[in-house]
Amino acid sequence: MLLSPAGVPEKPEDFDNQEIVDRFETKKGKLGAKIALHLWENNYTPFGILRKGGVLASKAFLNFYVGRRMTSIRD
């Protein structure tokens, strides 16, 4: 999904991160949501993390993604 800064409103005052975390049922899901929200609140983006990880991190992520999501085209 691509978002434009002009199209993203400010966070509502009544927004609660815990409400997002509570949508997940497993401990693993809740932990993942907490980590993702923490990183987002501190201005880390998924692509920023990949850039900081370098070529090996990017390649590992793409291999993981292709392997899990696009099984019909993997080696």
Image: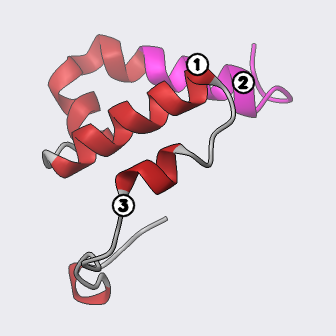
Question: What's under tag 1, amino acid-wise?
Answer: Phe
Question: Which element is circle 1 on?
Answer: helix
Most foreground residue, 70 or 4: 4
Most foreground residue, 64 or 17: 17
- Real-space Cα distance between discs 3 and 1? 31 Å
- Real-space Cα distance between discs 2 and 3? 31 Å
In the picture, the disc for residue 2 is: none
**49 on left or right of 60:** left
Image: 57 above or below 41:
above
**1 on left or right of 57:** right
Residue 48 belongs to magenta span: no
Q: Which residue is mark 1?
A: 64
Q: Which residue is mark 2?
A: 68
Determine the residue positioned at 36% across, 73% down: 3
Local crowd size for mark 3, using a 10 Å CA cut-off: few (<14), some (14–19), many (≥20): few
Determine the residue positioned at 46% across, 26% down: 31
Q: Which residue is mark 3?
A: 16
Question: What's under tag 3, amino acid-wise?
Answer: Asp
Task: Choose top left, top right, bottom left or bottom right for residue 5.
Answer: bottom left
Q: Earlier in the sequence, mark 2 or mark 3?
A: 3
Q: Nearer the viewer, mark 3 or mark 1?
A: 3
Determine the residue positioned at 75% across, 20% down: 74
Question: What's under tag 2, amino acid-wise?
Answer: Arg
Task: Choose top left, top right, bottom left or bottom right for residue 50.
Answer: top left
Image: 17 above or below 10:
above
Q: Name the quadrant of the C terminus.
A: top right
Check if mark 2's residue and mark 1's residue have beta carbons within 8 Å: yes
Q: Range of the magenta residues?
A: 60-75
